[in-house]
Amino acid sequence: MFTDVSMLVLTGLACLLYGIAFVLSLCHRAKASFWVFGLGWIANGLVVIGNYVLCGHPPFGNMYHVLVFLSLCFLPLYCLVRAWRGLGWTLGYFAFASFFPLLGTFFMERNLSWQRVPALQSPWFVPHVLSYMVSYATAAVAAILMLSSLWSKDDAASRRFHDASQSIMRVSLPLMTFGLWSGALWAEEAWGIYWSWDPKETWALITWLLYLASFHVFDSRGGRKRSAFLHLAGFAALLVTFLVVNLLPKFGSALHSYVK
């Protein structure tokens, strides 16, 4: 069932459906958008299952696997923030954000038979990677909303976008914190040291500190704009952590080279 061709077809179908869901949301057809989003999520889920079957391990060890799983996070997270935070109107932002990681998989080496190296054979592997993937997914949507806040000329709309962004980051930051903490425990188990100032570790810490600062300055005078810029700086650092450190050889991470 899970062949190279079928995986490509399912990935392309999920991408298409995510894009259609976004367009439908722009046309104010929220119900249709949600159901199309759901169909895309099912196709995306089949790709994740296929990756699991083909490699025999939780498929989190290379960029292709991680991007496929990252796209799968957005619909459940949308349902969470809709129920918990009353942010049902953000559907289109989640559909938009889910499209791009999956599109990115077409430009990655698809190592379908990937096997875990010894450093990854740890009980920390799944919770560490999973917490970061969920936190990165929510952070991506929060960043899009924060950009909308700065772009909007209407103060009420700008505040609405900003508050929604910060509300979503309240879901993301605890998971990011757990990812940082569990990574240190995993490092001690694998390499005998909690922290080595490896490029990926360093950028993960910078990302976390910037997001933390964005919450702390919000209540100060003129804090909303400073909070927005710190928030977007945090997302820029997140992109360096997730993409630049992993994909550009000169920024390569010796201890984390297995994620390429």
Image (cartoon, grey):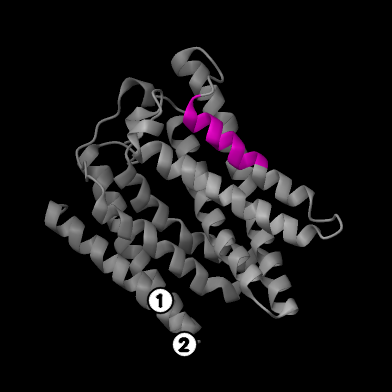
Q: Is 215 left or right of 123, judged from the image as shown?
A: right
Picture quadrant of residue 181:
top right
> Is the residue marked by circle 2 packed among few (<14), some (14-19), or many (20+) residues within 10 Å?
few
Quarter holding the C terminus? top left
- Tell me where residue 111 appears, x and y as whole percent: 21, 41
Q: Which residue is painted at 33% across and 58% down in the image?
A: 102
Compared to 239, does 206 lie above or below? Answer: above
- In the rendered image, residue 47, in percent from the top left (x then y), is placed at 27, 55
Residue 175 among magenta residues: no
Where residue 170 sits in the image (x, y, percent)? 67, 53
Viewer-nearest residue: 249 or 196: 249
Lateral position of residue 38 relative to residue 152, left or right: left
- The residue furthest top is 192
Please rate how many residues cluster around mark 1, counting C-alpha atoms within 10 Å: few if below 14, some from 14 to 19, many from 20. many
Give the residue at mark 1. 21
Check whether the beta carbons of the residues at disc 2 and disc 1 lie within 8 A of each other: no
Place of residue 77 in the rendered image (x, y in percent of width and height, measured from the top left): 53, 60
Residue 65 against residue 190 in the figure, above or below: below
Magenta residues span: 198-209
Q: Is residue 141 above or below residue 197?
A: below
Label 2 to label 1: alpha-carbon separation = 10 Å
Q: What's under tag 2, amino acid-wise?
A: Cys
Residue 27 disc label? 2
Question: Residue at (19%, 38%) from the top-left corner?
Answer: 113
Determine the secondary structure under disc 1: helix
